[in-house]
Amino acid sequence: MAVGNVTSFGRSGLSDWLLQRVSAVVMTVYLVFIVGYILFSGELNYADWKALHENFLVRLLSLFAILSLAAHAWIGLWAVLTDYVTVRLLGPSATAIRIFLQLGMIAVTLSYVVWAIAILWGAGING
Amino acid sequence: MNDKRPVNLDIATISLPITAYASILHRVSGVVLFFAVGILLWILDASLASQESFDSIKETLSSPIVKLIIWGILAALGYHLLAGVRHMIMDFGIGETLEGGALGARIVILAAFVLVGLAGVWLWL
Ligand code: HEM
């Protein structure tokens, strides 16, 4: 039976590794698209910018990008926290501190996802 | 765990190779980006909410201090992306030798300098 893992994002280190790569590629596609648009569409104006984000495919790509970002950041920051917030470096309270930081990281990540979806479907906090 | 085990990783006394700098910069830029995403979402939100908020965020983004922050975010993003692509190229077994690794790190750092320079030109000119 596979051993469960309460801290990594996917089921194993290998699936985390793969997700980290797939999400990196998806974000890169999104970035090339959006930066390309900003650079080459001339002076940005509200009507065109708004229309771009009402396009279904653009919304879909943006949604994939933010979901990728969430998985990517979750896995990446988990790796960083488990490297530095350790009992060896910080002493016996390290585990509690790390779990606290991990929960904070997860809360921020999930907030980003909800916020991005709200923005894309027209319910951002600015209007 | 036995805490008397020897630990010999006093980073301050070790002279780091360029690959180590490339690696730690990738990590630092990843952590910076995590917080930068909040700023970017806020800008996206304001830019799409209404014509008025589009105009006002455009105004905000033209201030020198905000431009500096955006430049920093673009630098982190540019470096992280380039180093990430290098990572994935190395996953395919390319440039995994000692020399290849050092060369790749040098290329990424150099390319990042060029990219960050271009981003600065775009922001200020
Ligand atoms: C903008 C959102 C992003 C955030 C917040 C982010 C954050 C991170 C973090 C914290 C790590 C872990 C670093 C480490 O363990 O040392 C990481 C790793 C990685 N990032 Fe990103 N990243 C982002 C975007 C990207 C993009 C656009 C790429 C495209 C190439 C990318 C490629 C990678 C790769 C390949 C790794 C894995 C490195 C490894 O296995 O050690 N990231 N990222």
Image: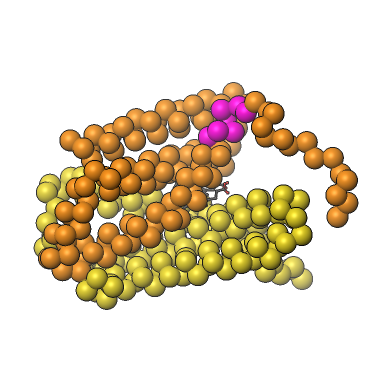
Q: Is residue B17 magenta?
A: yes
- Chain B, hue in figure: orange
Which chain is the one coloured yellow? A
Q: How far across and how far down the image is residue A81, in percent?
A: 62, 55
Q: B71 or A25, which lies in front?
A: B71
Furthest residue toward bottom: A123
Question: Looking at the image, which residue is at 65% across and 26% down?
Answer: B15
Q: How far across and how far down the image is residue A106, in percent?
A: 53, 67
Vertical placement of residue B19 versus B50, above or below? above
Q: Looking at the rendering, in which quadrant would you find the C terminus of chain A?
A: bottom left
From which residue to which does the magenta span run? B16-22
Q: A47 or B3, which lies in front?
A: B3
Q: How far across and how far down the image is residue A50, in percent?
A: 17, 64
Question: Looking at the image, which residue is at 53% across and 34% down?
Answer: B22
Q: Looking at the rendering, in which quadrant would you find the N terminus of chain A?
A: bottom right
Vertical placement of residue B31 versus B120, above or below? below
Snapshot colouring: by chain
Question: Looking at the image, which residue is at 65% across and 63% down?
Answer: A97
> Which quadrant of the view contains residue B77?
top left
* A126 displayed left or right of B26: left
Question: Looking at the image, which residue is at 33% across and 57% down?
Answer: B40
Q: How far across and how far down the image is residue A38, in percent?
A: 21, 49
Query: Is residue B89 something one can see in this rendering?
Result: no
Q: How many marks?
A: 0
Q: Is residue B92 magenta?
A: no
Q: B11 or A61, which lies in front?
A: B11
Query: Is residue A114 something one can see in this rendering?
Result: yes
Vertical placement of residue B27 versus B113, above or below? below
* A75 displayed left or right of A60: right
> Which quadrant of the view contains residue A87?
bottom right
Q: Main secondary structure of the magenta part?
A: helix
